[in-house]
Image: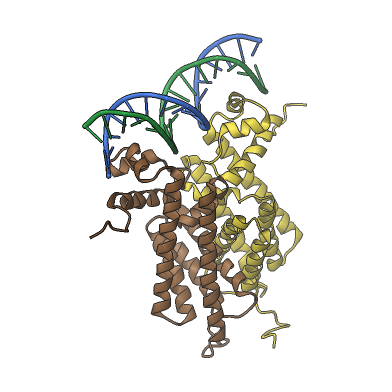
Chain colours: A yellow, B brown, C green, D blue
Amino acid sequence: MSDPPEPSDTASKVLDVAERLVQGRGFNGFSYADAAAELGITKAALHYHFAGKAELGEALITRYAERFARALDAIDARTDDAMDKLRAYAALYGDVLRNERMCLCGMLAAEYQTLPAPMQGAVVRFFDDNEAWLAGVLEDGRRAGAVRSDGDARDAARMIVGALEGAMLVSRLHADPARFSEAADRLLASLAAPGPADVGER
Amino acid sequence: MSDPPEPSDTASKVLDVAERLVQGRGFNGFSYADAAAELGITKAALHYHFAGKAELGEALITRYAERFARALDAIDARTDDAMDKLRAYAALYGDVLRNERMCLCGMLAAEYQTLPAPMQGAVVRFFDDNEAWLAGVLEDGRRAGAVRSDGDARDAARMIVGALEGAMLVSRLHADPARFSEAADRLLASLAAPGPADVGER
DNA sequence: GTCTATAACGAGATAGAC
DNA sequence: GTCTATCTCGTTATAGAC
C-alpha cells in the first residue's frame, strides 16, 4: 500500500556491495568508484543514495549491528544453555570469516582513528552491546554452573570479544577458517566449567 | 672508518614517524604528506630515502620484526619459566598499546588484502615467527608442568597471538590500556597449569 | 532515480636545480 | 641529501540535464 519503510532496492544493493568491500579492504581501502563499478552504476548515482562516504559508513554499521542483534535474539530463543550460546556466538564470527570477510566492526576498529566521529560512536556501541550480551550469558552460565566463574563478567566478555576478533584477523592472513575454529574451540574450552561427570578426566 | 651499516639518521627518523602514523591510522590512512609535514621535509625528500610507499612499508615491517625478535631473545635470556615468558610476551603488546598504538602487524593484518605482495609476505612471516616462538615456550612449559597441556602447541600459540592482537584492537577504542591488561591476565590464567600448591584452591 | 560532466582536492611519484 | 616544480592519477563531491 504505502512506500516500503525498508531501504530502496538499490540502496540495499549498495549496502551489500559496500559491506563486502569494506570487510575485505577496509573503509580507507574502499572507494565510491569500486562500489559503483561493481554495481554497474555511476559514482554520482551512489551519492544520490548516500550523501557521502561518512553517511554510507554509518548506514553500514547500523545495518550490521541490527543484523547482529537479531542473531543474538535468535540464539537466546534457541537455547538456554550458556555454553551452547557461546558456541553459537563464536559460530557467527566463523560464518563471516568463511565468506572471506573480516568482521565489519573489527575492521573499522583498526581504522578507528581515521573514521568520522559518528562512525566511531557506532563502532563503540557495537562492541558495548556485544559485551553486554556476553556478560549476561556468562552470569547466567555461572549461576547454572556451566561456566567457569572468576572475576567480573564484563571483563570476561571483553576478553572473549577481543579473542574472537583477533582470531579472525590472523586467520584471514592464511585464508584458513580452520585456524579460527581451532582458536575459538580453545577459547570456549577455557570458559567451560569442569563438568561434574569428568572432573580431572583421569 | 667506513660508512655506517645502520640506516642514515634521516631514514631512521622517517621510519620512526611513519611507524607511529601507520600504527595509529593504518597503512591506507597514512600518506607521504603526513610524514613529510611532521618531519619538516618535503615529500620529494621522502622519496629519496624510500623509493615508494611500498618500499617504506617493507622497511617498517622489517625493522619492527627485528625489534620484536630481539625482545623475544631478551625474554629467553632473562628467564626459563614458561609462564614468566608468556607474561613478558603479553607485556610487549601492552607497552605498544600504552603508547596509543596498535601492533604494526596487527594493523597491517586488517589491511592485508590491499597491501603490496612483499608487505603481505613480511606480515605473514611476522606472525609465523611469533607463533613458532610461542609454541616453543608452550612445549617447554608443558614438559616443566607449568603450562596446561592440551592439543597442538602451534594451535595454542595461534590462539594466544590472536587473542592479544584482538585485545589490543578493542581496548584501543576506549583508549584504556587497563582493558588490555585485564584480558591478557585472563588469557594467561587460562594457560597456567593448576599449581601443585593450590589445586582446587578450596 | 540515474545520468554526464566537471570541480576541487590530495595522493604517490618524477625531473632536475642546488 | 634536500629542494622546487610539476605531473598524473584517483578520490570525494556537486551541478544540472534527462
Residue at 53% in and 46% down: B116
Placement of A66 over or under B185, stated as above or below: above
| Image x and y of residue A78, in percent | 76, 59
The N terminus of chain A sits in image quarter? top right
Which residue sits furthest bottom?
B197
Number of marks in picture: 0
Q: Nearer the viewer, residue C14 or B137?
A: C14
Q: For residue B44, what is the image quadrant?
A: top left
Which residue sits furthest front?
B2
Q: For residue B80, what is the image quadrant?
A: bottom left
Residue B84 is left or right of residue B9, and the answer is right
Residue at 71% in and 83% down: A198
Residue A148 seen by the camera:
no
The C terminus of chain A sits in image quarter? bottom right
| Image x and y of residue A161, in percent | 57, 60
Residue A152 seen by the camera:
yes
Q: Nearer the viewer, residue B1 or B57?
A: B1
Placement of B110 over or under A187, stated as above or below: above
Q: For residue B73, what is the image quadrant?
A: bottom left
Residue B27 is left or right of residue A9, and the answer is left
Q: Nearer the viewer, residue B39 or A189?
A: B39
Which residue sits furthest right?
A1
Q: Nearer the viewer, residue B102 or A64?
A: B102
Residue at 67% in and 58% down: A177
| Image x and y of residue A130, in percent | 59, 56
